[in-house]
Image: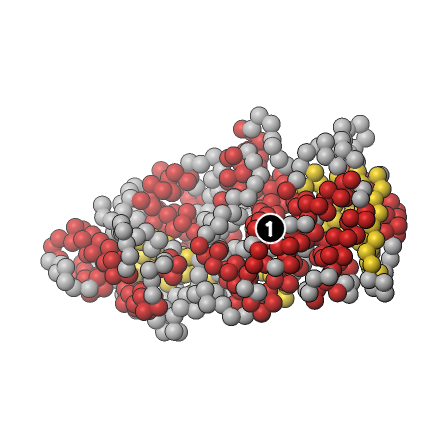
Amino acid sequence: MGLFLNTTIPYDSYKITASDRYFVDKTELLAELIPALGTSQRFLCITRPRRFGKSVMANMVGAFFGKAVDSSDLFSKLKISSQEISEKLKKSACKNYQEYLNSYNVIYIDFSEIPENCASYLTYINRILHGLKKDLNLLFPESCIDMGDSVWDLLNSIYQQFGQRFIFVLDEWDAVFHMDFITEADENAYLLFLKSLLKDKIYAELVYMTGILPIAKYSDGSELNMFVEYNMATAKRFSKYFGFSDFEVDNLYAAYLQTSEGPEFTRDDLRIWYNGYHTAGNDKLYNPRSIVCALTNHQLRNYWTSSGTYDSVFRYIKANIDGVQDDLVLLFAGEGISSDIQEYAATSMRLKTKEEIYSAMVVYGMLTYKDGKVFIPNRELSESFSSMMKKEEALGYIYQLANVSKKMLTATLKGNTREMAEILKYAHDTESPIFSYNNELELSAVVNLVYLAARDSYRVEREDKAGEGYADFIFYPDRKDMDALILELKVDGTPDDAIQQIKDKKYALRFKGKLGETPKYTGRLLAVGISYNKKTKEHSCKIEEL
């Protein structure tokens, strides 16, 4: 078995995944790839954010088509072998799935892998070129391979001599663009390598390529224009194969309940933490890695880890390019920000406008996009933003307000309304234009920021359904013995008006269980009213125990 050609790695990796307790069968994708074999539509590039199952699917494709290992036992138990898929293949004038199983020479390359002590593009690409030549020589010794010839010439020669075509499975195609030692000239050389290897090559039976970044911003329009690109937000096709749907998470949670002595969280908790990524088909998806980690570890927490790319994007936020920091406050308050990102492509980390910054953040999974607006998708990502706002001094007023938020929570719990009003005045006196309080949305954004520290011990929900309406904010404690808060805002009203609305709309019912049930929380339930008077420019606060 070779390093790249007919390697066993895809099969071995996918077999491990398929044996996992929280495995989700996505083999229906194969039924969409089979009709593309040998056609002009055989070049597919599917891009998704980090940890959305791209490598799992690449391994599945390699394990299914590749000759390296007989995988019939594995796939005979999965959806690809179902009668429904058989009928679908027949409608596409294709044969039974078994006719394609383990029938192809597969070249599988994970472009994120680098040689030991690699410090140059030449060292990086030579590993791939030399490895492919050795693999071809091993599999086709009678072809008299000249190791001095190019890989594409060798593949052409093998095709002409033996009629052999190849399936290419290329994972992390864009990894090169994130490597510190890669120059702009290297990037162009890499694109030329891909073009020379794949473009118009008759020996390519199928090219299945995945990554985070789209091709469009790197290709000049001709190098890799044979690919059809599919991203999560603008292309409907393939949407259901990456990320978990509500139905799939329902099944995973049911499996969790069967094996857990006592569930540590509810099904709705999973939705709050990890759902919220939108597709072009208007579906909402869960981050699959985070779901599996939460179920396996019996713990809800932030599994969305930082990376070099993540830090690079936030460099532009810290620099406040195009006034992006003010938008960040609104995003964190749960608002969507209008953004013109139809191309949906990040420009190799040279970002000059808000649209480019948001486009990059969507591509990397930091934001999601729907109906012309970007949003923070869920609590997991909110926590990542929260952590950044509390530690990055370069964020100016955002950092300053985030770090007085502990005082705001303490003052609220102690009923110190005077200190609360002083902190709100301090926030309002910053230079941010969104703190003009033209409406309750802007007041809401400020309140959200000055209570940032509350998120360490509360689940904070904005516009939450309660009683006979929607409360501006509800603070759900992480522990049952802590105080819960219902917070209502008024511009040109009074805190008494806010408190009265909490009572009239019966928001407290959100914390009442069914008759005879033990209350979920045993601490106090506090009604918090906050108002701002545009004439006097004064904040007023009031707190009552319900």
Say which residue appears at 50% left-offset and 39% top-offset: 293
Image: 184 above or below 426: below
Query: If the image is split into quadrants, where does the N terminus sit?
Result: top left
Residue at the location (81% across, 30% down)?
Answer: 515
Local packing at callout 1 (Cα closer than 10 Å; few below 14, some 14-19, many 20+) is: some
Determine whether 450 is above or below 120 in the image. Answer: above
Q: How does the figure colour the protein chain or chains?
A: secondary structure
Q: Write down the quadrant of residue 155 in the picture.
A: bottom left
Can residue 308 be seen here? The reply is: yes
Observer-nearest of 476 and 139: 476
Question: How many numbered markers are drawn?
Answer: 1
Q: Secondary structure at mark 1?
A: helix
Q: Can residue 506 be seen?
A: no
Residue 78 image position (x, y, % from top left): 43, 41
Determine whether, in the image, residue 353 is placed left or right of residue 460. Answer: left
Residue 86: give x, y in percent of width and height: 43, 49
Residue at (47, 40) in percent of width and height: 23
Q: Nearer the viewer, residue 145 or 126?
A: 126
- Which residue, given by chain and number where applicable, does mark 1 sit on? 390
- Amino acid, disc 1: Lys
Give the residue at x 27% y 47%: 7
